[in-house]
Amino acid sequence: MDSEMSDMDLTPAVDGENAPLYCICRKPDINCFMIGCDKCNEWFHGHCINVTEKMAKAIREWYCQQCQDMDPSLEIRYRKKNREKEVEPERAEKRSSTPEFKMDRRRGSKVSVSSVNVKRSARMCGECEPCTRTEDCGQCDFCKDMKKFGGPNRIRQKCRLRQCVVRARKMLRVRDEEFSLRERKDNIMHRRYSDDYDEMELYEHYKDRDASWGSEDEDGPVYIPVPRKKAIKVKHVKRRDKKFDKKKESRRHKQKQKHRDRSRHSERGDGRDGRDHRQCLGPNCIDAARPSSKYCSEDCGMKLAANRIYEILPQRIQQWQQSPCIAEEQGKKQLERIRREQQAARLRLAEMERRFHELEGIIAKAKQQVVLQDEDVNETDSEDTDLQIFCVSCSHPINPKVALRHMERCYAKYESQTSFGSIFPTRIEGATRLFCDVYNLQSKTYCKRLQVLCPEHSRDPKVLPDEVCGCPLLRDVFEPTGEYCRVSKRKCNKHYCWEKLRRAEVDLERVRVWYKLDELFEQERNVRTAMTNRAGLLALMLHQTIQHDPLTTDLRSNKDR
DNA sequence: CTTTACGAACTT
DNA sequence: AAGTTCGTAAAG
């Protein structure tokens, strides 16, 4: 096989019995460059049709000769870039010689507009500040996504600060306003504002300014104090020089940007000093604040914070105490209810534990009974007919006499094939024999069936030949007679596994009570957490209670009492 | 409708 | 070849 394959490289004429044939040569060779027709989907060897791999790279759509003959409208299409290269020289020249020439492609195109060389595209006006920005901030989510900043390159969008004010989608421009604020703040070092200055307002201010700046530029030679970007000659300049110029430009531009911001800031004339050194806001401190901080040190910040608390807290506590807290009262009521229910559940649990022991006593007593031989004659009563019922598990027809026994076993058989576990063992102190809790190494879980009902991990005990059934006999379904069934356990079909079922009944109820207790405990915890958090330090500092209308409040509190 | 992810055109 | 970023499908 191997040799055949390698042969194929050299002699494509080797024709496998069922290998598909391709190309005009109708040969099965596939180990060379091939191109597919975009109409008929047939594959052709490059060398058969004189198309090299290099040529194919420039091709976007390719049609075979046959398809082109059949449909003359089919035209081989090339990729834009390559087509440009192949464009006749005169056309290329024409383009470069017309300053207004626009090639608005999907991508950034260089547009020559009155000798300013700018980049324009559907997403870039080319004139706003973000468009002219050349460096990525390295801080925004888009930058962080980039490979160069160690990101996974999943979002693939350019830096938020470089998203065009005019044409970029809004979501790309601003998402995390806080971020862009911080960034701008960092960039414009001289700009300072105190915390009572509305940050949103500031941001809006920026946005507006940016937008207006962009349009100003487009309007033409109206001179404003804001220095316009100077025309930079780039046309017919060698590539290297161009690069150099660009760098210079961006540097100069940045300087201008700074200058502009500074002058704008002072124009605002809001009395705030834009200089770098502000006084620390710490109590009685006359030092200068650290850069990008309102304080000279951590200590001063903490002092001010402490003062704030001393100042505000007593007043808030007073406010809090002035009016009754409805939620607090409701919480108290709820706690009371929960406690009552817990009490009831505990009683019920004690009752169930008592019944648990009582049952064990009954079972022990039942075991001491003696088998009555003549009873089993009675058992074979006239019901021994051809009546048939079907097992609920296996659906086999079964004799009613043995139905209970069969179904119990049948169910156990199926049930034991599945596991029913949790990764946690049961931890209920003081509870005997509740969950099975056998550890399954494979699934790393603990069995969560009732122990008495788990056919997977505990088999029914073997019944000895002389064992008695011992099921307590009842009158009118519920009333115990004090008598016990004295049929041989092996033969009694009426009370098959009665101990198991009775135990399960009790255990199930015990589990229910435990669940109830658990639920109540959870509720209590929630209510308590809510109550402790309600008038905590943080809550008091953050919120305040205002009595808008004392009359209404009084009425309400009077009604409550 | 917005956000995320990604192929691919385009640039460096 | 590697990096950038646009348009859009898919997901939310």
Image (cartoon, coloured by chain):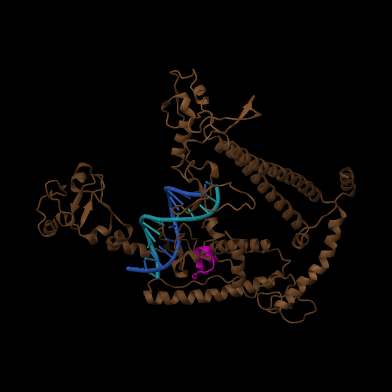
Chain colours: A brown, B cyan, C blue
**Residues drawn in magenta:** A127-142
Q: Would you say residue A431 is visible in this rendering?
A: yes
Q: Please name whichever residue, A460 or A158, is drawn nearer the observer in this view of the structure.
A: A460
Left/right placement of residue A58 relative to residue A455 reads left
Figure check: A87 above or below A290 = above
Figure check: A508 above or below A31 = above
Q: Please name whichever residue, B12 or A143, is drawn nearer the observer in this view of the structure.
A: A143
Q: Please name whichever residue, A429 or C3, is drawn nearer the observer in this view of the structure.
A: A429
Is A136 a magenta residue?
yes
Residue A317, given in percent of the width and then of the height, sits at: 84, 60
Quadrant containing the N terminus of chain A in the rendered view: bottom left
Q: Quadrant of residue A529?
A: bottom right
Q: Quadrant of residue A234?
A: bottom left
Residue A483, given in percent of the width and then of the height, sits at: 62, 29
Q: Residue at x 36, y 62 (%)?
A: A95
Q: Please name whichever residue, A53 or A430, is drawn nearer the observer in this view of the structure.
A: A430
Is A18 a magenta residue?
no
Figure check: A343 above or below A250 = above
Q: Residue at x 76, y 75 (%)?
A: A303
Left/right placement of residue A193 relative to residue A386 reads right
Q: Residue at x 47, y 28 (%)?
A: A403
Residue A388, given in percent of the width and then of the height, sits at: 44, 21
